[in-house]
Image (tube, rainbow, N blue to C red):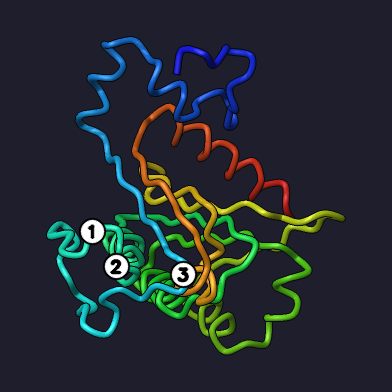
Amino acid sequence: MQFLSRQRRTHCIRCYSICNLLLAPERERKKLNSEVRDCAIFHAGVYACGPYCPAEVNIRLRHHSLDCIELSLRKLTKCIEESKSSVDVALFNIACPELMIALRNEAKKGKVIHMITDAKYIEDRLNFTDIQEAMKKGVQIKRKTTRFLFHHKFIIIDKKVLFQGSCNFTNTALRGNCDNFLITSNKRIVKDYVQFYEDLWNDIP
C-alpha cells in the first residue's frame, strides 16, 4: 500500500476510504476490533445453497461463507429487522421482494423508514404493488430529479451501521450479477454518510 500517495487515493465523502483505514495509526486500527466489519459477495449466476438455505439461518454460522447468495442477502434483511429506530435507503433501483418486505414490515412497527431513489426510475414503478404496499405501511419515499442518474447504493441502519456497495437490490443484481457490499459501523464513515443523507433528504421537496 505504500506506493499510493495521499493525493492519488480514492476518497469517499471526507477521505475515509478503505485505504485510509488500512493506513491509519495503530491506535486507530485497534478501534476496528470493536466495529462491525463484514461484506457480502454476489457471484454471477451462482445460487450456491439457495434451495437448501432456510430463511431464518443463523448468519453467524457462515455455513457457506461468501458462496451463499441467500446468506449474503440475509445479512441485510436481518439488520433491517433488528433495527431499533430507523433505516435510510439511497438506491437507484430497488425491486428485491425480500428487501421491500423487510422495509414494509419495519415501517408497520413504527420505525422511520426513508427511501430516496431515482425519479425517472421510480416514476415507472409507482403503481407496482410492492411500492404501493410499502407506502401504505409508512415507508417514506422521495424521488431525486437529476439530468443524470441518482446512482447511490447505500443503506444506513439506526445511523450506526452502513451498507455500501455496487448492488441495486434487484433480483438480477442479487441472483445474477457480480455485485458486493461492505458493512461497517466505523463512526467517522457512518457519521459522514448520515450527514450526507440528511442533507439530501431535506433538499428534496
Check disc 2: other Cα within 10 Å, few if <14, some if 14-19, many if 20+.
many
Q: How many marks?
A: 3
Q: Quarter holding the N terminus?
A: top left
The mark found on residue 65 in the picture is: 1
Question: Relative to the observer, which residue lies in front, 45 or 181?
Answer: 45
Going 27% across and 11% down the picture, which residue do you hit? Answer: 26
Q: Nearer the viewer, mark 1 or mark 3?
A: 1
Q: Which residue is mark 2?
A: 68
Q: Is residue 82 left or right of residue 123?
A: left
Query: What is the number of the mark on residue 174?
Result: 3
Q: Could you tell me the amino acid type at mark 2?
A: Cys
Q: State which tag comes first along the sequence, 1 or 3.
A: 1
Q: CA distance from mark 2 to mark 1?
A: 6 Å
Helix, strand or loop for disc 1:
helix
Residues at discs 2 and 1 in contact (Cβ within 8 Å): yes
Left or right for 64, reference 175: left
Q: How far separated are the C-alphas under marks 3 and 2?
A: 11 Å
Quadrant (top left/top right/bottom left/bottom right) for the C terminus: bottom right
Identify residue type, mark 1. Ser
Q: Say if 62 sits above or below 202 in the image.
A: below
